[in-house]
Amino acid sequence: MHYHAPETLDDALGHLTAGNVTIVAGGTDVYPARGAAPLKRDLLDITRIGALHGITRGPGGWRIGAATTWTRIARADLPAAFAGLQAAAREVGSIQIQNAGTIAGNLCNASPAADGVPPLLTLDAQVELASIKGRRTLPLSEFLTGVRRTALQPAEMVTAILLPDPPAHATGAFDKLGSRRYLVISIAMVAVVIGRDASGHIDHARVAVGSCSPVAQRLTGLENDLIGQRPGDIRVTPAHLTPLSPIDDVRGSAGYRLDAVAEQIARAIRAAGGH
Amino acid sequence: MDRPLSTTTDFTLNGAPAHATPQPGERLSRMLRERCGAREVKVGCDAGDCGACIVLVDGAPVCACLTPAHQVAGRRVDTLKGLASDPVAERLGGSFLAHGAAQCGICTPGMMVAATALLRETPAPTEAQVLDALGGVLCRCTGYRKIIEAVMQAGAPLPAPVQGDGHSGAAIPRLDGAGKVAGTEAYGDDVAPMGTLEIMLVGAPYPRAAVTLGDIDSWHRANPGVVAVLTAADVPGRNRFGVMPGFEDQPVFAEAETRFRGEPVAAIVAPPDLAATLDLTLFPVTWTQLDAVENVTEATAPGAPLLHPDRAGNVMVTGFVACGDAETALSASDVVVEGRYATPFVEHAYIEPEAGYAYPDGDKVVVHACTQAPVLDRDGLQMVLGLGPDRIRIIPTGVGGGFGSKLDMSVQPYLAIAALKTGQPVRLAYSRVQSMQMSTKRHPSELHLRIGATSDGRLKGFSLQGRFNTGAYASWGPTVANRVPVHGSGPYFIRDYRAEAQGIHTHCPPSGAFRGFGVPQAAIAQETLFDELAEKLGIDPLEFRLINALNTGQPTVCGQVFTQGVGIRACLEALKPDWTRERAAAEAFNAENKTLKRGVGIAAGWYGCGNTSLPNPSTIKCGIRADGTVVLHQGAMDIGQGANTVITQLFATALGIPTRRIELIGPDTDLTPDAGKTSASRQTFVTGNAARLAGAALRTAILTRVNAGPEATLTLDQGRIHVSDNGRDHVIDLTELPPDSDGYVLGASETYDPPTKPLDKNGQGVPYAQFGYAAHLAVVEIDTRLGTLRPLRFTAAHDVGHAVNPALVEGQVEGGIAQGLGMALMEEYIPGRTDNLHDYLIPTIGDIPPIQTLIIEDADEHGPFGAKGLGEHALIPTAPALLNAIRHATGVAIRQTPVTPARLRAALKEAGHD
């Protein structure tokens, strides 16, 4: 068994191509999943690759390096539409988890309860992937394919999360529901980004829900219905929630999740609307 | 391409260059502890769920258990010990001590490192900033409030030290606190030298399984570095242990059949680097899953498999108390309420998993482990090892939380057997998953209560029927079954009472002792039904309790009549101002708010201190050396509650010298006499009395030498005792006195055993020499749309007889409330499903509101200077107070805990809330 810590992306892709490696960055999912079991594959530590760190703005959008930590995201100077993403960053585990855990790790772990996914869905995130064959991008909703499943091909890794410039007037919010205050896996969570016109009516809407389906879902039907409404007036109907398929587990029942999430959506929209 | 980093990692550790050679993928926590000796980095979960291992990497707090060791190459790592020279951390340490922010101390390193990072950025943080910074560090002892205070006040001048001799009644800082805030206290896994052989256990994957061991010799030959493989055949004595005489029913290694998930069948002993790479899934054992009974309904169904052939119907034991005629009284009641309640397994979730170290020493085996009961451990090992007590030495380590579960042996038999078998030092630390699978739990309960009252508000008849899931083995199940009927009435006067509690075996982990021994479960049912009864009668809930509160001179349900020391009325009276104010405030709030609803609940509790009608002695030995050092052999386990401090204060008070002059020895079964187990709220009372008697005896021995009167004052200096007696001064030159075999020129040893009497077939008798009393008030705010609950504050009134150390009293109360809150709102252990600290939730620092403790001192005639026990009392009223607050806020009566948001929301909808 070996531990590789390359400093360039090319070196990392070389190790990936050689095969039989597990990528590790913050370790916040790799180690809990491994438990006390012995290491069975080489580890590829990508945190020394400078190009994978940081948040930059380019023409048409934002780029968040794969190994960027949640703390860095939470503390970054970002537009108001990113408020939900930043709030989620502050809810990932705890401070010490946020200092280590990375945005791409959160996506690749592909937990239904990943805190980062709903806000990234509301920001129309694309996932940038690389292998020695080249790069490609996928919408986040296509990158995540199921519980603990992604569209990553063998020898491929995430290099960045790409976010198009949101409408300048858009604002975001995030609402996490758990059984205790800190360090809690969500029962349900909601992220929204809304924009309002001069009269206060919604003219841009993104709503995504996590922990209520194998992969967090955008509620596009609801988004369409929100257009033209005021944040304080919205009504979430069961039909709006049909993309969701929650389960019963130790954190809550399916029925509770649907019930609570409707309320959380209304609250998140009001919060994003400044209420 | 880069070179693999499988070799040396160079980094800066606490300001100095360090290098180590971790295995690929090794956790930073393991490298720091086992290659660099940084044992102040604690391991509580290996999953980022507890924060005990927090270190700073380049100044930022991270969980060392989640950090690849190689990742710190070229970086700076700081642990608590390295922060000792940091002025911020140094002030914080002083503040932690002064505010009582460390109890057991196992979370303290992570807590202080995380807080240091906060204070460097934010020297005067707000409460919200402290909560955010420490939200990922779990503490199971303190209830967090004193930690918040210590961090917020870290930059302020320390509170003035307590003046005087630190005698009983003084709120001195705990005597053993310095090592806790410095990170030098050694817990169960901190004693073994680096490189010690490690023990790994092979445990059952199913609730019940037939087990066949395969060709172990071949496996061993294929893994030549393995030093030993141990199975039932290697148990030198009886392959059975247990804590109660006659109930030793648990095998060290299961044979033929396993009875709960995780139950060990074999142990492997190997050097650490081999242990880390062994794949135990390849160990030759065949499991065949068998039909299991996992709750009392299944276990008592006709044809259910018997866990123990001699226990028909899987009934282990039935406890019973009856007085008067409950059924007739219920029929004659004007109002009767009835409820069926269910509570789940609750996990102790101390932050320190069970761990220890053992080695052969001449003809002895020496076992260092975290424990609440060193002498019980020795007794247990005698049976398992087939050795006499003189061949076994138990030296307890620091204990990172116990709460009842560390009364039972865990790692001890494996350590002792492996040390004897290999002839070498060995160590064993349970993983968090193993700890949760194998350690004892709070019993799940099914309770059916009916309570009647007359229209004037007086309790009339009371019937309690309880079934407790006692798991696969006895542990303390018999105690629970016997305690519940004795306490089920609560601290009230009831003439007509009948209570029966059964312990039922299932294929679950053994249920055992957990703060309250079943009484908290019963109190939930009794105290919430009292509120329903009060409402039906149109009587204020506090008034209803006052009408029925037990008075001196009135018999308990066991027929025991106290002529003094019944403090429940005083506790309830003390809550009256807050009750009146908070109820009115909540109702005013609710009139203005539709979605958020506030409620105020109260509940009371009592708890008999010490064993139930069984001998229960503690012995304390002390002596003075020729140089004038006063030595106290203190065998009462301090598991964070403060026995080291309280016992010393009581001894020093009786002896008449300052507490700070006492040197402590022990605990160590070769050096300290048996002070019994740290259990049943007995140490302050029972061992405290032994300490008081020993101090008094030593004082008498001193005074007698110079014919001084009892009021004389003693002063110690180098080799001399000055006795000042009413103007006459004497000097005893200690250097002239002959030392005994311990080196003492003066000494004493005293034993105390509380006066109790057996219970007859109806549970009538004198179960305890004293009870402690408590009443809690809880204020909650409920988000009715989401079913979430935010506790706003607690007021806790506790009759402790006499507060030996008021600061430690507050610590116990706040910690008990936090555990009671967890039990009420979030904690549910499901074997095989919530075996970790992210699925099994305990309160975080953000979940505990301000707590005001009101100390009531209704002195007890048996207690040392009037003191009563406190440990369990602090938890008992909390959950029912919260449930009563929920009912006040919303009208919803809860019958099942924990009251998770999903359950509360379902109940609210059923009750017609939006």
Image: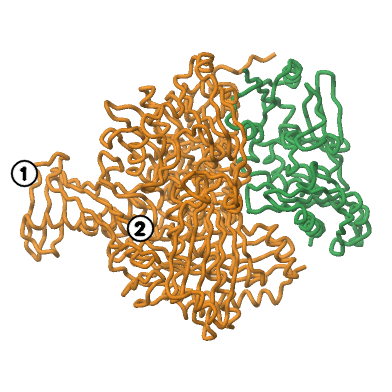
Chain colours: A green, B orange
For residue B554, which quarter of the picture?
A: bottom left
Q: Which mark, by number, is residue B736?
A: 1
Q: Tag 1: residue type? A: Glu
Q: Residues within 10 Å of mark 2 (few under 14, many from 20)?
A: many
Residue B248 is left or right of residue B221, and the answer is left
**Disc 2: which chain?**
B
- For badge 2, the amino acid type reads Gly
Which numbered disc, 2 or 1, marks the residue that appears first in the sequence? 2
* Furthest residue toward bottom: B456
The residue located at (13%, 48%) in the rendering is B746
- The answer to whether residue B686 is left or right of residue B332 is left
Q: Identify the subunit bearing mark 1.
A: B
Residue placed most toward the observer, B69 or B282 = B282
Look at the picture and state if B341 lies above or below B442: below
Label 2 to label 1, Cα distance in Å?
42 Å
Say whether residue B136 is left or right of residue B704.
Answer: right
The residue wearing badge 2 is B610
Q: Depth check: B131 or B439 in front?
A: B439
Element at badge 2?
loop
Q: Are marks 2 and 1 in contact (CB under 8 Å)?
A: no
- The residue at 43%/30% (across/down) is B427
Q: Nearer the viewer, mark 2 or mark 1?
A: 2
